[in-house]
Image (cartoon, rainbow, N blue to C red):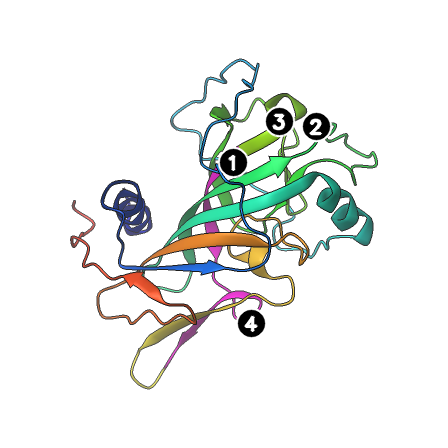
Amino acid sequence: MDNKQKALAAGAAFLLTAGVAVSTWYFSKGRKPAADAGAASQEEVKVEEEVIDPNWPGFDDPSSKDNHYLSKVEAYSRSQYVSDVNYLLTLGFVKGGETFCGKVTIDYNLSKKTEDFVEGGDNSECLFIDYKGKLIKSLTVNGKKIGPNTPNVWVKHRIYIPKAHQIVGQNKCVVEFETFFVTDCQGMQYFKDDADGSEYIYSELEPDYCHIIFPCFDQPDLKATHKSCIVAPEDWEVITNSAKLSVTAAASFSDNT
């Protein structure tokens, strides 16, 4: 297990067990989440569990370095059937400035099921989550994992949710991912001071750069609440424009542990 994976594992463990993290904060804006957003839906996803090779690296997007923009038609369509969105996000940072790992749990309400992605077709009314990154290591929708046997999952910065995995009502999508740092101020910016070797990162999310950091419904009329856990090197200071809930020292790790 490399340091990026260990950082993510440490943050996830804090959130799922102790409820604390290296730096955690809560921010709420706009529409309130459903009253029972964390509860499982009454409807069961009737799809066979996909057997996934443990050595499978995950999904990649061949066009990850290209620019693909959300259209007005796609945004309007999605806003008609997606609501009550909530994010539980863990990001694990290590020094080096190449990539960082994360895990996000997205709770959302779906008013209707949408059709599956069709290659070469009009997919503007399909259900998808925006994400521009390096790798999707794991994708689970309503308790069922989606693997390499499912075609057209991640296409042009869109994670398409198969109709068979959708539920009318409350849905839950869990994504483990790896994202590139950026140097163009669109996403998670990385800078190294040549004078003293110090490293700095900061997030640049407006107007529509949030999906360059983590998978999300990246359009302004889909307001959401979120809770975030940041795992960072001990000598880094985490600064946020929202109040920190807690700060906890994580166990140290090395390449040999």
Task: Specify the amino acid type for callout 1.
Answer: Cys
Q: Residues within 10 Å of mark 4 (few under 14, many from 20)?
A: some
> Disc 2 marks which amino acid?
Lys
Q: Which mark is residue 166?
A: 3
**Which residue is rendered at x = 52% and y = 70% of the image?**
183
- Residue at the image point whose x is 42% and y is 22% from the top: 53
Instruction: Residue 104: give x, y in percent of width and height.
Output: 45, 45
Q: Which secondary structure, mark 4? A: loop
Across and down, in percent, residue 246 comes to: 26, 60
Q: Quadrant of the C terminus?
A: top left
> Residue 14: which disc?
none
Any mark on residue 185, and which? 4
Q: On the rendered image, what quadrant is the N terminus found in?
A: top left
Measuring from the top left, give residue 115's x and y in whole percent.
Answer: 74, 27
Q: Which residue is mark 2?
A: 113
What stretch of residues is rendered in magenta? 172-193
